[in-house]
Amino acid sequence: MNETKLIADLEEINRHVDNDKKLPGAKNIYLAAGWFSDTQEALLKDAFIQLSANPTIAHIHVPLLHQYGGMALGDANSEPDFEWGAMTYKADIKAIDNSDLTVAVFEAEDADTGTAMELGYSVASNTPIVSVFSGNIDQHPINLMLSFGTDAHVTSTAELANYDFFDITPNKYMGKLI
């Protein structure tokens, strides 16, 4: 896990987004995803790439790109102080409030608790949620609070490139639950 490289990669991807291909009324989203393992990092990056290509998405708020003081939680900030934690939390909550919807990315084998909290806050604030449950959801069941807390779900980040965020249609979760 290398937050500095991941941030640079996300910023580089963002520089190449063709905003001329965005549809009128395109949505602003909050991208909730962990980056605390190699798999979570890869899922976050791929979700960002796929969502950036989607013409129904205008702006993607990635919390990692907006950490308080410009310092992400990780190697350089492994023991954050109270101010950093409080201000990062408040910024994330405000970003969800300012978004049209939340896209929450979960690795079935290791669902991030921060992403789960962001999903819960989105539910409480009536922000629509589309979740990605990546991995083997039968061998690694998804907690029922996550699977039922989402309005719709997909099973791969690749599906985000063509997902119609103008018409979030609820679908039935088909994996095992815990």
Image: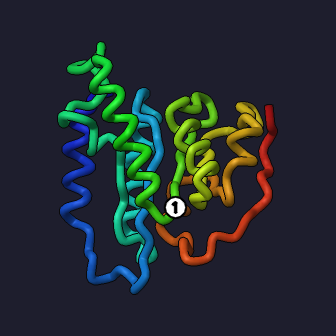
Question: Relative to 153, does residue 148 appear above or below in the rendering?
Answer: above
Query: Which residue corresponds to the image point at 67% horizontal and 60% vertical from the top-left?
Result: 152
Number of labels in the image equals 1
Mark 1 burial class by Cα count in 10 Å: few <14, some 14-19, many 20+: many
Question: Relative to 58, does residue 14 appear above or below in the rendering?
Answer: above
Which structural element holds mark 1?
A: strand
Task: Write down the residue under mark 1.
Answer: 101
Question: Relative to 173, does residue 109 appear above or below in the rendering?
Answer: above
In this view of the protein, can residue 153 be seen by the observer? yes
Quadrant of residue 164 within the rendered picture: bottom right
Decide if residue 77 is on the left or right side of residue 36.
Answer: left
Image position, residue 139 (x, y; %): 74, 32
In this view, the residue in front, 76 or 124, is 124
Query: Which residue corresponds to the image point at 44% horizontal and 71% vertical from the top-left?
Result: 27
Query: Which residue corresponds to the image point at 25% horizontal and 57% vertical from the top-left?
Result: 13
In this view, the residue in front, 149 or 86, is 86
Decide if residue 140 is on the left or right side of residue 112.
Answer: right
In this view of the protein, can residue 130 be seen by the observer? no
Image position, residue 2 (x, y; %): 27, 29
Q: Mark 1 is on which residue type?
A: Leu
Image position, residue 37 (x, y; %): 43, 27
Type of colouring: rainbow
The quarter of the picture where the C terminus appears is top right
Query: Which residue corresponds to the image point at 24% horizontal and 42% vertical from the top-left?
Result: 7
In this view, the residue in front, 120 or 156, is 120
Image position, residue 77 (x, y; %): 25, 20
Q: Looking at this rendering, what residue extends furthest in the bottom direction?
A: 24
Q: Looking at this rendering, what residue extends furthest in the top direction?
A: 79
The quarter of the picture where the N terminus appears is top left
